[in-house]
């Protein structure tokens, strides 16, 4: 019996540790040949010297299990590096079928304290990094389609965050980048569907190097030997599914995933609508309809991160 991703090749960015590592291993377990990308810096803020070791270790782990994998050292926020990453997948495996964008850094600060560099660096790695790899993967798939190839297969799985959905007071750069990734995903889904490509995004919860302080004390394993409810291994199977032929009908979607739960997120809905009684609204008329509307909403009907995320201490 063939594996779901047998004969397919994939790129996973930020795959040297944490979520990306779990995703790369899962795609390989399902039969894909994998390019393991990671810049290998020691700091979660993007500090430290680049190192090929994290990517090479994951690629070696895949090969030791009987799979095919190659490591790639590179910063995907660099346009030409992203080009080289896609070129490597094509050179090694003949084509690219799956792109999983996961690479990212954190530089947390309240909006009134954040520096320009802290803003730019996080948006660059997350949002621009997602765009760079998506661009070159899309060029590859569109080129094959334009050359007359039938049955072009393409899957993009992007990584957003509930920081975009619920707000995160100390992460204006991260939350904005993750919201932008959702917009990039839905736009790409519409643009690339004609070429046989789908694009979806996930909002994962996982205890990794990037989130160890965020999730400290939350949803800890209840007994020794139990799988951590916030383990990356809870997220990876959804990425494998979205990369597979079974998900051909899933496109432009956003899904929250953690600890044995997958939630499909609806697009924003209009909760109330008001029409002017005249030709155009005045300040007074807006005050007369909007102020009572918001005043009538239940007390506490505002985003509170822990409640929205469904997290519990202990």
Image (cartoon, rainbow, N blue to C red):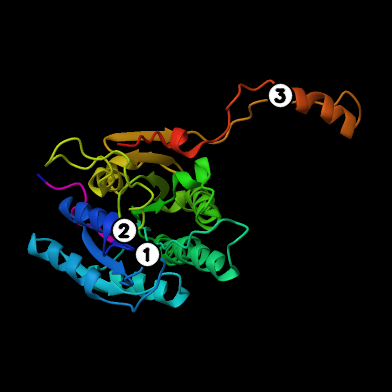
Whether residue 228 can be seen here: yes
Q: Residues within 10 Å of mark 2 (few under 14, many from 20)?
A: few
- How far is mark 3 from mark 2, CA to CA? 42 Å
Q: Foreground: 236 or 92? A: 236
Q: In the image, residue 226 lies at what x, y percent?
A: 15, 39
- How far is mark 1 from mark 3, CA to CA? 42 Å
- Regarding mark 2 in the picture, which secondary structure is present there? loop
Q: Is residue 203 above or below residue 115?
A: above
Q: Which residue is mark 3?
A: 295
The quadrant in which residue 261 appears is top left
Whether residue 281 can be seen here: no
Q: In the image, residue 39 lies at what x, y percent?
A: 33, 72
Q: What residue appears at the point 14 percent right and 68 percent down from the top-left corner?
A: 60
Q: Is residue 26 magenta?
A: no
First in residue order: circle 1 vs circle 3: 1
- How far is mark 1 from mark 2, CA to CA? 7 Å
Q: In the image, residue 74 lies at what x, y percent?
A: 35, 74
Q: Foreground: 210 or 95? A: 210
Q: What residue appears at the point 31 percent right and 58 percent down from the top-left corner?
A: 209
| Proximity of marks 1 and 2: CB atoms separated by less than 8 Å | yes
Q: Foreground: 84 or 114? A: 114
The quadrant in which residue 86 appears is bottom left
Q: Is residue 92 above or below residue 248?
A: below
- Regarding mark 1 in the picture, which secondary structure is present there? loop
Main SS, magenta residues: loop
Q: What residue appears at the point 44 percent right and 37 percent down from the top-left corner?
A: 306
- Regarding mark 3 in the picture, which secondary structure is present there? helix
Residue 209 disc label? 2
Q: Is residue 7 magenta?
A: yes
Q: Which residue is mark 1?
A: 44
Q: What residue appears at the point 31 percent right and 47 percent down from the top-left corner?
A: 206
Magenta stretch, residue numbers: 2-10
């Amino acid at each position: 019996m063939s594996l779901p991703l047998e004969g397919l090749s994939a790129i996973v960015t930020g795959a040297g540790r944490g979520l990306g590592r779990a995703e790369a291993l899962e795609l390989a377990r399902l039969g894909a040949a994998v390019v393991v990308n990671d810049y290998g810096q020691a700091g979660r803020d993007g500090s430290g010297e680049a190192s090929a070791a994290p990517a090479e270790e994951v690629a070696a782990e895949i090969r030791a299990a009987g799979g095919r994998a190659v490591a790639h050292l590179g910063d995907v926020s660099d346009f030409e590096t992203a080009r080289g990453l896609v070129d490597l997948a094509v050179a090694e495996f003949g084509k690219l079928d799956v792109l999983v964008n996961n690479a990212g850094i954190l530089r947390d600060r309240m909006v009134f304290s954040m520096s320009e560099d802290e803003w730019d660096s996080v948006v660059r790695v997350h949002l621009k990094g997602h765009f760079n790899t998506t661009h070159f993967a899309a060029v590859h798939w569109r080129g094959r389609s334009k050359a007359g190839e039938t049955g072009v297969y393409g899957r993009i799985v992007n990584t957003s965050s509930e920081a975009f959905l619920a707000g995160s007071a100390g992460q204006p750069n991260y939350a904005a980048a993750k919201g932008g990734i959702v917009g990039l995903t839905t736009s790409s889904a519409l643009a690339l569907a004609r070429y046989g490509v789908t694009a979806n995004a996930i909002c994962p919860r996982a205890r990794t190097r990037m989130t160890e302080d965020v999730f400290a004390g939350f949803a800890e394993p209840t007994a020794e030997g139990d799988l951590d409810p916030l383990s990356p291994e809870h997220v990876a199977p959804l990425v494998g599914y979205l990369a597979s032929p079974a998900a051909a009908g899933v496109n432009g979607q956003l899904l929250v995933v953690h600890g044995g739960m997958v939630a499909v997120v609806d697009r924003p809905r209009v909760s109330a609508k008001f029409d002017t009684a005249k030709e155009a609204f005045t300040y007074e008329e807006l005050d007369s309809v909007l102020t009572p509307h918001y005043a009538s909403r239940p007390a506490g009907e505002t985003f509170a991160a822990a409640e929205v995320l469904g997290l519990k201490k202990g």
